[in-house]
Amino acid sequence: MTTADNRSAAERARQHCLLSGKQLKAARVLAGLSQQQLAAETGRSLRTITSWEAIAGKPTASRNSVERIQTALQRYGVALYVTPAGGYGVEKAPGADINRS
């Protein structure tokens, strides 16, 4: 596999990187959203968002749900990421205005 292939694989893996409930909560808080607001933004129930955030490990979420979460967070300038060592986190895009109203 070439470096370009590795980069493409890494980019694809990064697209779906919801790895923990703590990561989801941190991203939501960084975006300035309540659980109810994130539920509305993603079309998921408040109960679903609450239960995903309470899970210590990886929430059981469909690819579609993860995509909806990532799209909603991106609108607020927040992204989920995975480190090369397999860690995970959240980040605010440089210059992003995350205090939308």
Image (cartoon, grey):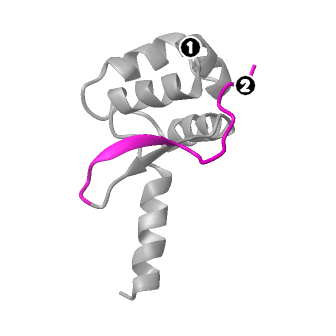
Identity, as a three-letter code, of the amino acid under mark 1: Ser
Element type at mark 2: loop
Q: Can residue 97 be found in the magenta stretch?
A: yes
- What percent of the width, then of the height, locates residue 10? 41, 66
Q: Residues within 10 Å of mark 1 (few under 14, many from 20)?
A: few
Element type at mark 1: loop
What label sits on residue 58 in the rendered view?
none
As drawn, the residue found furthest toward the right would be: 101
- The stretch of residues the image draws in magenta is 85-101
Nearer the observer, 29 or 96: 96
Looking at the rendered image, the quarter that the C terminus falls into is top right
As drawn, the residue found furthest toward the front would be: 95
Mark 1 vs mark 2: give the one in front: 2
Identity, as a three-letter code, of the amino acid under mark 2: Arg
Nearer the observer, 18 or 60: 18
- What percent of the width, then of the height, locates residue 54? 32, 17
Query: Image point 63% across, 40% down: which residue?
Result: 77
Q: Earlier in the sequence, mark 1 or mark 2?
A: 1
Q: Which residue is mark 1?
A: 34
Q: Which residue is mark 2?
A: 100
Is 97 located above or below residue 80 in the figure?
above
- What percent of the width, then of the height, locates residue 73? 59, 35
- Distance of mark 1 from mark 2, alpha carbons? 13 Å
Quadrant of the rendered image containing residue 3:
bottom left
Query: Image point 48% across, 31% down: which residue?
Result: 27
